[in-house]
Amino acid sequence: MLKATKLVDEELYNIVVGELKRQENNIEMIASESTAPIPALELSGSVFTNKTLEGYPGARYQSGAEFADKMEILGVERCKALFKADHANIQPISGSTANYSVYAAVLKPGDTVLSMRLDQGGHLTHGSTVSQTSKYYNFIHYGVHADTEQINYEELEELAIKHKPKLIISGGSSYPRLIDYERISDIAKKVGAYSMADIAHVSGLVAAGIIPSPIPHTDFVSSSTTKTICGPRGGMVMCKAEHAKALDRGVFPRTLGSIHVHVMAAKTYVFKRAATEEFKQLMIQTVKNAKHLATCLEKDGFRIVSGGTDNHLVMVDLRPKGINGKQFQEALDYVGITVNKNMIPFDTEKPSITSGVRIGTTAISQRGLKETEVEQIAAIMNKVAENITNQEVLDACKQEASDLISNFPLYQEDFDPVTI
Ligand SMILES: Cc1ncc(COP(=O)(O)O)c(C=O)c1O
């Protein structure tokens, strides 16, 4: 895949090979990451890169669209069939722009929106004070119960009645539990709001049918395509038939210029792959691995936020170990396990320090790791937490992690992403 680059720009080639080796040699456990299948890499780098295109099939602003039209229609049909959605728009170039397009479809500047707090599981684009979204719209936030660390639906309803939002958002980036989409949509209907579920993290699990889908209940469902759905860096939005026109306008021309047609091709493939039994089994194993990781870490004295997980991510409170998220992330990085520090509900640490880490199991499950290996990873994590400044122990952990992951190739050998 990089043969031509190697010939013309060896310096850059070596950087990309370095990244490939990093991914191969590390145990990647960032919950928003996955390994894009080779066809998705190929399609993202295909000649569709050369095509400038705006608008929709049959109503483009540029000619020469016959193959791109065919492809977008195929991608949209696959996406609709996969999620059982009335309508899909697969043009957004990321999960963030997917969200902006819903806002552009139904909101005016100054409108009130109700969403989950970022530090209790939400996302930056859901009106965090550091996001531009909070400057355009009046965001109000609900959170989780202090004891269960699960969504406080009573608070959500009270805030909805009090503030009469135009849009209620569910979903987030660090919420390990199932969401009662029906209940949230009912609250939205009661107060005359639109409902939107951001399933960026869990769209693979929803596609595989192993966790409940918001599609039957929610007006708009947005997602990125990089996380559990294991695709290219992109986004998409689905909606009920009556919102199709508004959504399409929200995407183009309101929040998008020309389409990343090459990435749309990769998404189109990923929707086919996500409909297979093999993908379903992968998603089942991903959740099993996350649940097992939570159990093992809890046994070792970590506190698991909300007491467990229903999806691909585990939120870990490090305070019982006397360490913070930054220290643990850095020490794990040294031993070759990649995670990210993350605020936990009611965290008293700064976002740059945090009391917790977020750990995901998608990428390791793709490589074939199962419960036995998850136990080994949990044991390494515990040794690291207990010996955070002991260089000898960290070095031994590094060797152990390297030995473990070397048995599970990132890509099969006959699909080497550098040499094909
Ligand atoms: C819930 C949620 N929504 C949206 C996004 C944004 O996706 P992207 O990084 O593709 O813009 C993320 C990414 O982490 C997310 O977790």
Image (spheres, rainbow, N blue to C red):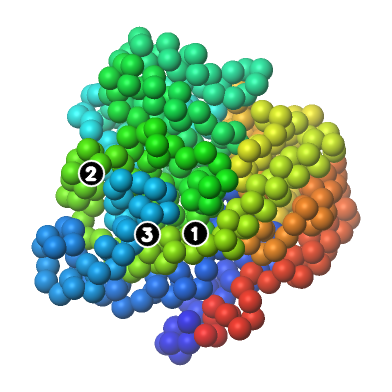
| Label drawn at residue 274 | 1
Q: Earlier in the sequence, mark 1 or mark 2?
A: 2
Q: Which residue is mark 3?
A: 78
Q: Nearer the viewer, residue 271 or 132?
A: 271
Q: Is residue 182 left or right of residue 90?
A: right
Q: Nearer the viewer, residue 30 or 10?
A: 30
- The secondary structure type at the circle numbered 3 is helix
Decide if residue 385 is on the left or right side of residue 70.
right
**Ligand 1 contact, mark 2 (Cβ < 8 Å):** no
Counting residues from the start of the chain, the first of labels 3 and 2 encountered is 3
Q: SS of the residue at dot 1?
A: loop
Q: Where does residue 133 sit, x and y in percent of width and height?
A: 32, 34
User: Quick one: label 1, few (<14), some, or many (20+) residues within 10 Å?
Assistant: many
Whole-angstrom CA distance, mark 1 to mark 2, is: 23 Å
Amino acid carrying mark 3 in the image: Arg
Describe residue 140's horizontal placement relative to residue 65 as left or right.
right
Residue 35, percent across and down? 56, 63
Q: Position of residue 198 (x, y in %)?
A: 42, 39
Residue at the image position 48 percent from the left and 77 percent from the top: 12
Instruction: Indicate the quadrant where residue 350 lies.
Output: top right
List x then y, in percent, for residue 285.
Answer: 67, 53
Residue named by callout 2: 244
| First reached walking from the N terminus: tag 1 or tag 3 | 3
How many other residues sit within 10 Å of disc 2, few (<14), some (14-19) or many (≥20)?
A: some
Amino acid type at circle 2 is Ala
Q: Quadrant of residue 111?
A: top left
